[in-house]
Image: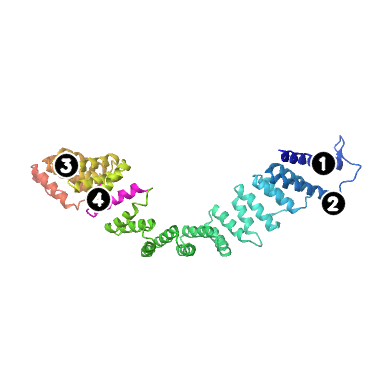
Amino acid sequence: MMAFMSSVRTLIALCSMSLILGSCAATSDRSGSTIHADISAPDTTALRERADEYFFAGRDLDRRGMSVGALACYERAYEFQPTSQTLRDIVVERYIALGRTDEAATMILGNHKSTDSLSDSDKRLLTRCYAGVGRPLEAVDLMTGIKDPQPGDFGMLAYLQESTGNLAGAMAALTKYCAKVPADDDAARRLGILFIKLHKYDQAESVYVAIAGKHPDSANLIDIIANIKLLKSDTAGAESIYKTALVADSSDPVAHEFLGRLSILHGDARGALMHYRALLPQKTGDSTVIRRTVGMLSYFVSLPDSAKFYLSSAVDAAPDDAQSHMFLGFADQALGDTVAAERELRKAAEIDTANVEAWRVIVSLCMKQKRFAEAEAAAAVIAKIDSTKALSWGLLGFVRVQAHKYSEAIAPFRRSVSIDSTDGESWFQLGSACERYSHSASVGIR
């Protein structure tokens, strides 16, 4: 508290001194004309001493965290020494930090008629003013006009160019910065991202390979390089990177997930299952998705018990996931539990009403049990969902034929052949239905 009061007294004394000096310098009569004081104005030395007093008072207030009072002192110091570049820069920096960019810009420009005549350091300060008030294009012009650019100037120019949407300009500036500051990995990463955005994948790969050389254990960098190879359509290269990663760390989750996805693309369900199983103890945040994937893959490789185990777990964790319910239904069907299978498939169709695959299996289950009315209802749902598919109408017609509803089967078969006139099966079924309905004359009519 004593220190605070001491600082306040210092500030009050200095302000009082400035008022005295100001009143001694000049007064005005009622007409507004200036009446010079009897005593002479302080000499240059005295002004410098006063500026020093305010400057050191400002430093003292800064140390005490009294930034507002400190700025007032610096402003007064600058008034006593208006030619001091140091004092001006301190005040300008404070104005910029406080968002008083208009005042800062006015001080920087001074008597300059254009920004071309500003020094490099003033252009940097004015750039910060313009960037802070949403004038990036003017800021770019200032930065490109710096005669002796420093590494940080290229970094700032890259940021400004990117903010204006000029990715090529940002790339050029950041390339120069990275050449001058090769140790800045964050900047190199930004450069790699710019190369990717500009579809310069070879350059992007080179940048990330160089960074990875410094951080050989970074799984994230390995993942980025592999994905760049995929962007280059170099699937084999990406696969090689991840296989090498697994040699170094057999539990690498990024490598297992990538190779699992790649195996699925190649139709290798067993290979995919091996990689996704390796993720189970690791990917806790995505465990439901991983369990569902392991369950689905288990079904595809004819392991229904394993499929049921993992899919039941996935359903418990995400009861509104239609895919999990559907594949659990498939697993139940493979295990011979048709009641459980139909229950899960209907749940899947309830969650995702456009799930044609689930409805098709429901039709099949009902047909096997000769529950033709339920099968027909399910087939009608499919025809409504996929009304532009010949197969959907053909299925509805087939179910009605099996239920001996020949007259009602004719319309869906006609709809099927109108969609696909090359569908020989529908033509045959149409003729058969007509014949059975005693419309033999309709056989062969297209």
Furthest residue toward right: 38
Q: Which residue is mark 1?
A: 17
> At which x and y percent is residue 336?
17, 46
Please tell me which of labels 1 and 4 falls first in the chain. 1
Please tell me which of labels 2 and 3 falls first in the chain. 2
Secondary structure found at label 1: helix
| Left or right of residue 269: residue 102 | right
Q: Is residue 300 magenta?
A: yes
> At which x and y percent is residue 237?
38, 65
Please tell me which of labels 1 and 3 falls first in the chain. 1
Q: Which residue is mark 3?
A: 366
Q: Which residue is mark 4?
A: 306
Q: Which residues are magenta?
A: 286-308
Between marks 1 and 3 in the image, the one whose residue lies nearer the viewer: 1
Please tell me which of labels 1 and 2 falls first in the chain. 1
Rounded to the nearest angstrom, the CA distance separating label 4 from label 2 is 92 Å
The answer to whether the residue labelled 1 contacts the one labelled 2, judged by CB atoms less than 8 Å apart, is: no
